[in-house]
DNA sequence: AAGGCGGGGTG
DNA sequence: CACCCAGCCTT
């Protein structure tokens, strides 16, 4: 039996029952693919359900406020996915009158859709024989064919895309693509792959050479930077607080947060009042403060470790742009803020 | 070509 | 602790 036959047979027996496996509706498939980028199925599944419930059609998503879309996305990370999804939904609903593009090259033009996602939608929804290459595919192909080209080099990206294209089952590209990915997720796992019961054990190059564990090859590790971030949680006697939207380019763009002071070193509780950034921020306002977490909370992202402190600051009055504390939970926030809002006993 | 972008899970 | 996950965008 050849490679694709083995895979599709394996898939028909072992595939998980996922909600987007019973539809070819491009809107649903699109949603599922964006949500699942760099995300494990278990983590993304409840978000997929929430999105199809809240926005059953592309028009519903297009008509939504960006803030509401981000709120529904809260906790999933890589928030540009949500912003681009919303942008493209508006484009499809208005400019394309709700008709999703039906060819790889046109799907690829949508913001937030790259080679992988365009291939997935084109093959699953429109039977176009475009090969998907995601993390699973890199792993399966590099091992089965014994390829040690780094998967994150431009040479590797081209090589694996080309190989995947030559292998695709043109008669059923959608199922074949999903079979290859599912095989990587369940059978040919990163750690402890099930080689002893693998249907491809007789022809897997890496298994024969004994280097399954060292494939695929990936260059360069992302280096982690450390930051100290201090959130200023104001509380006024009329139960208001300050909450502001992040407008800067980088992390958590367009999400909301308490006023933030970044410091190079940890801000000591006895030095809070004298730190220049604090004195300039408060500018003669009377306040009482305390530290919510004496131990810094280390919020770990893939490329940053954020040493986080929440300072509770009680004041008499706050300016007009303050918000009611009771409305805090309606704003999209980074998960580290969302967790704090859940845990802290605000006066309401 | 390289780096930034989240949060959760695994060994 | 390191590495991975249905990747994409910007520089």
Image: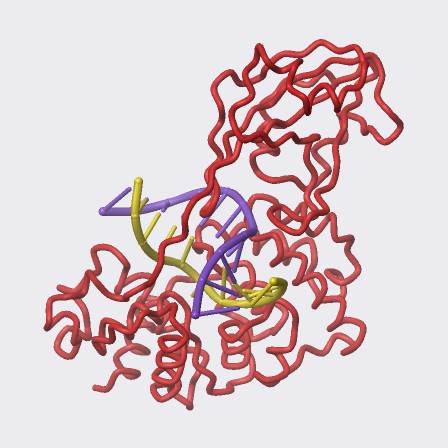
Chain colours: A red, B purple, C yellow
Residue at the farthest front position: A276
Which quadrant is the C terminus of chain A positioned in?
top right
Q: Is residue B10 above or below residue A275?
A: below
Percent from the top left, x then y, of residue A326? Answer: 76, 26
Side of A318 relative to A195 (left or right): right
User: Based on the displayed image, in which of its 4 quarters is residue A244 positioned?
Assistant: top right
Q: B1 and A66: which one is in front?
A: B1
Q: A174 and A246: which one is in front?
A: A246
Side of A26 relative to A127 (left or right): right
Percent from the top left, x then y, of residue A56? Answer: 68, 61
Percent from the top left, x then y, of residue A242? Answer: 76, 28
Q: Is residue A8 above or below residue A134?
A: below
Q: Residue at x 40, y 80 (%)?
A: A158
Q: Residue at x 56, y 21 (%)?
A: A267
Side of A346 relative to A33 (left or right): right
Label count reads: 0
């Amino acid at each position: 039996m050849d490679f694709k036959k083995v895979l599709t047979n394996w898939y028909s027996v072992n595939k998980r029952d996922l909600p987007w496996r019973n539809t070819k509706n491009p809107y649903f498939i699109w949603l599922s693919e964006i949500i699942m980028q760099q995300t494990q199925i278990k983590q993304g599944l409840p978000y997929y359900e929430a999105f199809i419930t809240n926005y059953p059609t592309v028009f519903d998503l297009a008509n939504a406020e960006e803030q509401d879309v981000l709120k529904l996305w809260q906790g999933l990370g890589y928030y540009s996915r949500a912003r681009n999804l919303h942008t493209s939904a508006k484009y499809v609903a208005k400019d394309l009158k709700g008709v999703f593009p039906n060819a790889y090259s046109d799907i690829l033009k949508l913001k937030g859709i790259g080679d992988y996602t365009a291939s997935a939608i084109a093959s699953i929804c429109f039977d176009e024989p475009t090969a998907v290459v995601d993390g699973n595919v890199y792993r399966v192909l590099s091992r089965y064919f014994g390829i040690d080209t780094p998967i994150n080099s431009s040479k590797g990206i081209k090589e694996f895309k080309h190989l995947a294209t030559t292998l695709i089952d043109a008669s059923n590209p959608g199922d074949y693509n999903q079979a290859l990915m599912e095989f990587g997720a369940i059978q040919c796992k990163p750690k402890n792959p099930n080689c002893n019961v693998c249907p491809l054990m007789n022809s897997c190059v890496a298994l024969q050479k004994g280097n399954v564990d060292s494939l695929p090859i990936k260059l360069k590790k992302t280096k982690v930077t450390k930051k100290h971030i201090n959130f200023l949680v104001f509380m006024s006697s009329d139960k208001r607080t300050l909450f502001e939207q992040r407008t800067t380019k980088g992390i958590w763009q367009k999400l909301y947060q308490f006023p933030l002071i970044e410091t190079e070193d940890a801000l000591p509780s006895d030095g809070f009042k004298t730190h220049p950034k604090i004195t300039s921020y408060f500018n003669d306002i009377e306040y009482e403060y305390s530290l919510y977490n004496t131990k810094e909370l280390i919020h770990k992202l893939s490329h940053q470790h954020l040493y986080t402190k929440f300072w509770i600051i009680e004041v008499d009055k706050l300016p007009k742009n303050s918000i009611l504390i009771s409305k805090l939970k309606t704003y999209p926030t980074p998960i580290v803020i969302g967790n704090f809002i859940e845990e802290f006993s605000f006066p309401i």
